Image (cartoon, rainbow, N blue to C red):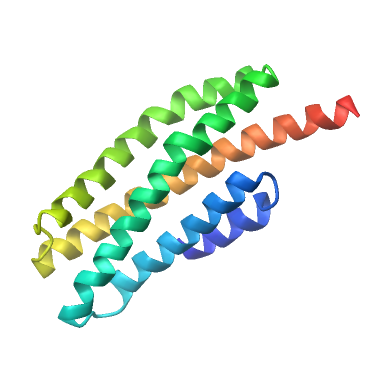
Amino acid sequence: MLESCRNAQERWGGVHQLIDRWLHERHELVTAYKGLVDVPQVPSTSSEALQGFCQLMVDYVSAGHFEVYEQLTNEAKAFNDQRGLELAKQIYPRLEAITAVALAFNDRCDNGDCRDDVSLSEQLHHLGQLLHERFELEDCLIEVLHNAHQEQAAALV
């Protein structure tokens, strides 16, 4: 997951400042996730690491829904990019479903329901799979919109 995050930054870094910042946030989120699942945590720091991960996750999904997706849709509309708009129409419902799972996980942790190590491990594994799927969907959306608009912008010059 971390490697695909780096690949996305290499492919689209510099396209747009908003996307650059968002991809950086994605990298931080993946790093925090790996810190939770790859390294056994000391009980006193486990809660802090989990809380930090949840905050990064909420910030990341919020930026996606309230900033990045909106910007990409506006760009598609500005370039009359019907292919991009259709893709967004197909992808957004799945992104929203993954967001709902991520926010529910955050809420469970806020309520103190993430204390069972076995259950937490299973929940994190499932969440990691969904986040990986989300990143792939987002990358697809960015790639289609960027490539279409880059070609159109070059034709205008």
Q: Please provide percent x and percent y for residue 114.
A: 13, 61
The structure residue drawn at horizontal position 63% and vertical position 40%, both measured from the top left corner, is 143
Q: Please provide percent x and percent y for residue 151.
A: 79, 31
The structure residue drawn at horizontal position 76% and vertical position 35%, both measured from the top left corner, is 150
The structure residue drawn at horizontal position 37% and vertical position 57%, both measured from the top left corner, is 56
Q: Please provide percent x and percent y for residue 31.
A: 42, 67
Quarter occupied by residue 48? bottom left
Q: Is residue 81 among what the camera can see?
A: no
The quarter in which the C terminus is drawn is: top right
Q: Is residue 73 left or right of residue 52?
A: right
Quarter occupied by residue 141? top right
Q: Is residue 154 above or below residue 50?
A: above
Quarter occupied by residue 38? bottom left
Outermost residue, bottom side: 42
Q: In this view, does 6 lie to the left or right of 147?
A: left
The quarter in which the N terminus is drawn is: bottom left
The structure residue drawn at horizontal position 72% and vertical position 30%, both measured from the top left corner, is 149
Q: Is residue 6 above or below residue 104?
A: below
Exactly how many numbered labels are in the figure?
0
Q: Is residue 8 among what the camera can see?
A: yes
Q: Nearer the viewer, residue 82 or 46?
A: 46
Q: In this view, does 156 lie to the left or right of 3?
A: right
Q: Please provide percent x and percent y for residue 42.
A: 20, 83
